[in-house]
Image (cartoon, rainbow, N blue to C red):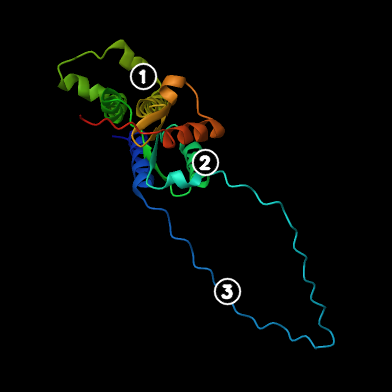
Amino acid sequence: MDRSQLILIGLPIFLFCSDLFNLFTPPPPKPPSHRTNQPQPHIPHQQRPPVVVPGTLDFPSQKPSGLGAVGYGNTVEINFCISCSFKGTAVTMKKMLETAFPGLDVVLANYPPPAPKRLLAKVVPVAQMGVIGMIVAGDRIFPMIGIAHPPAWFNSLRANRFGSMASTWLLGNFLQSYLQSSGAFEVLCNGELVFSKLKEGRFPGEIELRDLISKTLTKPSVVTGSY
């Protein structure tokens, strides 16, 4: 195997290993801040500037909304698609609900795609490496499996090795990202579905979600007894 073949084989393997390394490597710790306690220069009594006390401004007090007390003992679950970059919206909704309903437990979780898509997402990297290996060493693989003359599609891929390998890698990554995404943003309050992006086809507004949670929390519970 010559040097060019080694480079073509090693480049995808290096990119694949770097993706795995970046995925499982924890973030580096923050460097400690070194602050030197420098003595403040002594100012003579005659040269000290006068201390100005700012006056307090009186703002009109806000009336309590009366919705905070219903938050204690209740749970809101926001299940969203992490691979779809919905985390920023979920965090914003979490802060808004915790501010509007003090004591409310807001839980963020990933909404996984269906099982067939998850299974196909695991098959894609194997298919990527198989196609790349076929492009690099297909002239020796085909005779080993009993094919004396390689097919025409292999010759077209072999004519431009680097372009075919790069296209296979990019297409596989795009397909894997698509299969891992669910596009969901589901909001549940005490186990009851309040809003579903899969059904509505849109994200909820902050005021809309606050009103939906408020109606669910203040909904009177119906208790049926046996006579």
**Precedes in sequence: disc 3 or disc 1:** 3
Instruction: Choose mark 3 or mark 1, whichever is in front.
Output: 3
Q: Which one is nearer the viewer's eye here, 144 or 170? A: 170
In the image, what residue type sits under mark 2?
Thr
Residue 83 occupies which quadrant of the picture?
Answer: top left
Q: Which one is nearer the viewer's eye here, 148 or 58? A: 58
Vertical placement of residue 79 versus 134, above or below: below
In the image, what residue type sits under mark 3?
Arg
**What residue is disc 3 on?**
35
**What residue is disc 2 on?**
92
Gap between marks 3 and 1, in whole Å?
Answer: 60 Å
**Precedes in sequence: disc 2 or disc 3:** 3
Residue 106 occupies which quadrant of the picture?
Answer: top left
x then y, percent, for residue 185: 43, 30
Vertical placement of residue 207 versus 69, above or below: above
x then y, percent, for residue 226: 20, 30
x then y, percent, for residue 88: 50, 39
Instruction: Choose mark 2 or mark 1, whichever is in front.
Output: 2
Left or right? Give the position of 37 relative to 17.
right
Q: Secondary structure at mark 2?
A: helix
Instruction: Choose mark 2 or mark 3, whichever is in front.
Output: 2
**What residue is disc 1 on?**
157
Q: Secondary structure at mark 1?
A: helix
In the image, what residue type sits under mark 1?
Leu
Q: Give me the residue at 71% from left, 51% from top.
A: 60
Q: Give me the residue at 47% from left, 42% from top.
A: 94
